[in-house]
Image: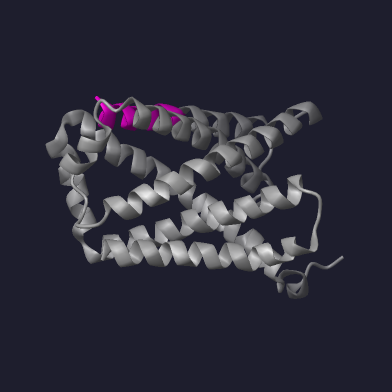
Amino acid sequence: MKNDFRARNHPAWWAFAVHRLSGVLLALFLPVHFWSLGQALQGAAALDSVLQWTALPIVKFGETGIVLLLAAHMTGGIRLLMIELLPWRDWQKTLLALAAGVSIAIGLVFALNVF
Amino acid sequence: MRVRQQVWLWLAQRVSAAVLAVCIVVHLVTMIYAVRGGLSAAEILARTQGNYAWFAFYTVFVLAVSIHAPIGLRTVLAETLGWRGVVVNMLTLALGITSALAGMRAVLGVFS
């Protein structure tokens, strides 16, 4: 059976794609995150030399993106857990919109505070 | 990989996900609070140094993500790229161990 665009042009497929992509990108970010915080072992000055980058608008923009990815992966993951572990109810269809809405809201709140 | 092991990986992925959901909510709130007025080592270390509650929280967080991320990557490698087998299993296991070590190094860095 051909798996053409019609199988993918569905909100649930997009939820799958966002969950997968955000998961891979977050996994790639993790070593950078651990390395930069690990600089604290060399003292506060070493940690500050990494943290000074976070004052740059481009880095703040990137951080907002990572927060959005984290929020999207979390809300999408909670949706998956609820679908897999709870008995099916019709309201679970609205979890997609809820996951998208909540993650965008978290991204916006972070952006408003970081800039 | 045998079915029994696959089931354990599935379960570990779900249990770690549930733990991470709680950790990430705390992490998001902390971050949104911490970035106000910019990040500084002094501000971060004032919160974390010698604080056993944050140390315990970040230890659980690091261990949960070190279980969750490699299992997820293993699934993506298998389903998206078709990479399966012992080499991929060992590679993702090594990633998990490295992540746990690097993560705990960071946790000790901000605690000590």
Would you say residue B99 sits in the magenta stretch?
Answer: yes
Quarter of the figure with residue B106: top left
Does residue B100 appear to the left or right of A87 in the view shown? left
Quarter of the figure with residue B15: top right
Dominant secondary structure (helix, strand or loop) of the stretch shown in magenta: helix
Q: In the displayed structure, would residue A106 be above or below residue B6?
A: below
Q: In the displayed structure, would residue A12 be above or below residue B103?
A: below
Q: In the displayed structure, would residue B16 be above or below residue A9?
A: above
Tell me the residue at 40%/67% (across/down). A108
Magenta extent:
B98-112
Which of B89 and A71 lies nearest the eye of the viewer?
A71
Q: In the displayed structure, would residue A52 be above or below residue B94?
A: below
Could one spot residue B89 in this view of the protein? yes
The quadrant of the image that shows the C terminus of chain B is top left
Tell me the residue at 68%/39% (across/down). B84
Which of B25 and A65 lies nearest the eye of the viewer?
B25
Which of B11 and B33 lies nearest the eye of the viewer?
B33
Outermost residue on the left side: it is A45
Task: Find residue A81 and report its horizontal and vertical position in percent.
Answer: 68, 47
Does residue B26 appear to the left or right of B90 in the view shown? left
Task: Find residue A13 and report its horizontal and vertical position in percent.
Answer: 69, 65
Does residue B29 appear to the left or right of B63 in the view shown? left
The quadrant of the image that shows the N terminus of chain B is top right
Task: Find residue B47 and report its horizontal and vertical position in percent.
Answer: 25, 37
Tell me the residue at 65%/55% (across/down). A79
Tell me the residue at 65%/44% (across/down). B75
Outermost residue on the right side: it is A1
Task: Find residue A59 and report its horizontal and vertical position in percent.
Answer: 28, 60
Could one spot residue B102 in this view of the protein? no
Q: Number of marks in the image?
A: 0
Quarter of the figure with residue B44: top left
Would you say residue B106 sits in the magenta stretch?
Answer: yes
